[in-house]
Amino acid sequence: MPPLDPRAVLAGRPTARPSVGVVVTVAASSVCLAVALALMLHDGASGVATSVVLALAPLPLLLAGVLALDRLEPEPPDALVAAFAWGAGVSVLLALLVNTAGLELWTPLLGVEGGTYATVSLVAPVVEELVKGTVLVGLLWFRRHELNGPTDGIIYGSMVGLGFATVENISYYAFAAPGTLAWTFVVRGVVSPLLHPLCTSLVGVGVAAAALRPRGAGRARPVVAGFAGAIGLHALWNASTGFGLGGLLVAYVAGAAVLVVLGVVLHRDRLRIVGLVRTYLPPYEPTGVVTPADVRMLSTLRARRQARERVRARLGRGPARALADYQQAATELAMLHRRYDLGVVELPAFTARRDPLLLLMAHARAVFAR
C-alpha cells in the first residue's frame, strides 16, 4: 500500500500542515495580544511579570481538564490553538476597546462608580461573548466537519474562553490596588476560573447544534440561543458584584448549575457517539477493515486504552500509534455517516471523506494486527 499521512487524513485535508486560515488567525491574534498588552502598559499597569505568572499558573490544570474531555474524538491541535489564540488576542483587544468606549459613555451620566458598574454589567457581557463567539461561528462556516456534536462545541468554546480569561486576568492582577493582589488572585484564579469557558461553551453548544442541521432558517436558532445563554450568565455574574455575598452566591449557584448541565450533555454525547460506532461500523465487517471485536473495543474509552496498552507492550510504540489512528478514524467514519443521514453532507463529499478514512484504517490494521 502507498504511504499515507494519518494526520492529514484525520484532519480531512490533503496535508497535515496547518491551514492558511489557522496561520492567519494565530498571526492576527498574536498582533492583537501584543497591542492589548502595550495598551495595558501605557495605562500604567504595574508588576506585569508577576501578573503573567499568576495568570498562567492555573492554565495547565484547566487545559488538561478540557483536553481530557476530548479523548473519544480528539480535535485537530491546530484548530484548538487557533481557538485559544483568538480568545487571547483578537477577543481581548476588541473587548478592551469597546468596553473602554462604553465606560467613557456611561461615566458622564452615572459617575465613575455607576458608569463602571453599568459597563461591567451591561456592556462587557454582550461585547465579550460576541467577540469570543465569532470564531466559533467561523468554524461553522469554514470547518463545519469538525463540529460533530455538543462535545466539540464545548471543547472549542472552552479553549476560546481560557485564552480570553488568561489575558484578562493579567490586566486584573496588573491593576490590582496595593495589598489586594492576593485577594484578586483568589477571586479570579481560584473562585471563578471557569466563568469565560462556561459562557463561551454555551455558544459552542449552539454552534455545534447548528452544524448538524441541514441548510435552512432553523440553523440560526441554536446559535442565537447559545449567545443569549452566554450573555445572560456573564451578565448575572458581573452584576452580582453589586449585591454583596448574596448576589455572588446566586451567580455562583447559576454557574454551578450550568456546569452540571454541561457535564450531563457531555455524558449523553459520549453515549451517542458510542451508539454511532455500534450502528455504522458493523456493515464494514465484510471488507475486513472492521471486526466484531473492534466494535466492542471502540465502544468504551477504557477498552480503547487497554487495547493500545496491549499493543504497545507486545509490538511497541509505532503499532500502538497505528491503533490510536485506527480508533480515531473509525470514530470519524461513524460520525460522517451520521452527518450524511442527517442531510448535512452531500454524497460526493461523503465519499471523498469516507474513502481516505477506510484506507487509513486498512493501513493501521496492517501494522497493529500482525
Image (cartoon, helix red, strand yellow):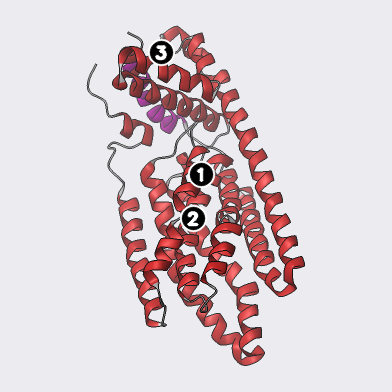
Q: Which mark is residue 180?
A: none
Q: Is residue 223 left or right of residue 251?
A: left
**Residue at x-position 59% and y-position 64%:** 187
Residue 180, picture quadrant = bottom right
Taking depth in this image into account, of 370 and 51 the one nearest to the observer is 51
Is residue 192 visible in the rendered structure shown here?
no
Secondary structure category for the residue under label 1: helix
Tag 3: residue type? Val
Give, as a single range, the part of the protein colored magenta.
347-363
The first of marks 3 and 1 along the sequence is: 1
Taking depth in this image into account, of 239 and 182 the one nearest to the observer is 182
**Residue 119 percent location from the top left of the image:** 60, 78
Q: Is residue 11 above or below residue 275?
A: below
Q: Which residue bears the numbered disc 3? A: 289
**Residue 265 percent location from the top left of the image:** 65, 39
Tag 2: residue type? Leu
**Residue 123 percent location from the top left of the image:** 60, 74
**Residue at x-position 66% and y-position 64%:** 237
Secondary structure category for the residue under label 2: helix
Q: Which residue bears the numbered disc 2? A: 162
Tag 1: residue type? Val
Q: Is residue 97 above or below residue 343?
A: below
Q: Which residue bears the numbered disc 1? A: 66
- Mark 1 and mark 2 in contact (Cβ < 8 Å)? yes
